[in-house]
Amino acid sequence: MKSILILFIVIHMLLPAQLHAACSRIATINYQKILVDAGTDKKGEGLRFYLEKDPQSKILLDKYQKENQPTFLKASTSTIGSVLLLTGLLQPNESSGIQNKNTLMYGGAFLIALSYLTSKTLQYSNEKYLEQAVDQYNKRNSPRIYFSPYKENNKKTGIGFGFSQEF
């Protein structure tokens, strides 16, 4: 059971890095496909060339990128959760009190889940700044940028597991 949990944690850590390297969001400008994200650390950077032409769009893009930057709190919460979970796995069964195996494992799993859900919620709510930046640009400038950060209009239904890109 422990080896399955450790394998799950390792796969969970490696999978998102491979997914982001393989694909990215795409905007259409002058019938050309433009990559929106230059990497995981520079989301929206592919549109900067166009959005810099409009001062309001540039301000919104800068705000979007600033809000997407990783913070010490986000990193430390998930790290502490991982340490608690691994400590619980290595703890002997006869421990009692706060050092109980189950307490450490459940506390660590709770912190990891809380950190993940919080970061995903903040990332999703932050997408409004990028959408507003594109809308402000399209009101006053050309060529128009066709981009929706929330969904693709491909009329497919299904269940999402943390990513919604097509390859």
Image (cartoon, rainbow, N blue to C red):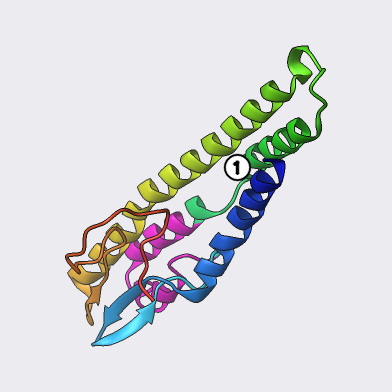
> Is residue 135 rendered to the left or right of residue 88?
left
When the figure is inspected, residue 7 is found, relative to residue 52, above or below; the finding is above
Q: Say which quadrant the C terminus sits in.
A: bottom left
Q: Main secondary structure of the magenta part?
A: helix
Q: Nearer the viewer, residue 56 or 159?
A: 159
Image check: 136 left or right of 38? left
Q: Going by the picture, which residue comes out furthest to the top?
A: 97
Q: Is residue 77 above or below residue 30?
A: above
**Residue 100 coordinates in the image, percent (x, y):** 75, 19
Residue under the point 65% across and 47% down = 4
Q: Residue at x 61, y 46 (%)?
A: 71
The span picked out in magenta is: 42-65
Asked whether 73 or 82 is in front, the reply is: 82
Which one is nearer the viewer's eye here, 104 or 24?
Answer: 104
Find out whether residue 82 is within the magenta segment: no
Categorize mark 1 by other alpha carbons within 10 Å: few (<14), some (14-19), many (20+).
Answer: few
Q: Quadrant of residue 143?
A: bottom left
Image coords of residue 40 (percent x, y) = 54, 65
- In the picture, measured across the screen, residue 30 lies left or right of residue 122, that is left
| x then y, percent, for residue 98 | 74, 16
The image quarter in which residue 134 lies: bottom left
Quadrant of the frame with the N terminus: top right
| Residue 63 magenta | yes
Asked which secondary structure carries label 1, the reply is helix
Q: Give the residue at mark 1.
A: 74
Quadrant in the rendering for residue 151: bottom left
Q: Amino acid at mark 1?
A: Lys
Q: Say left or right for 24 vs 56.
A: right
How many labels were placed on the picture? Answer: 1
Q: Position of residue 57 (x, y in %)?
A: 33, 64
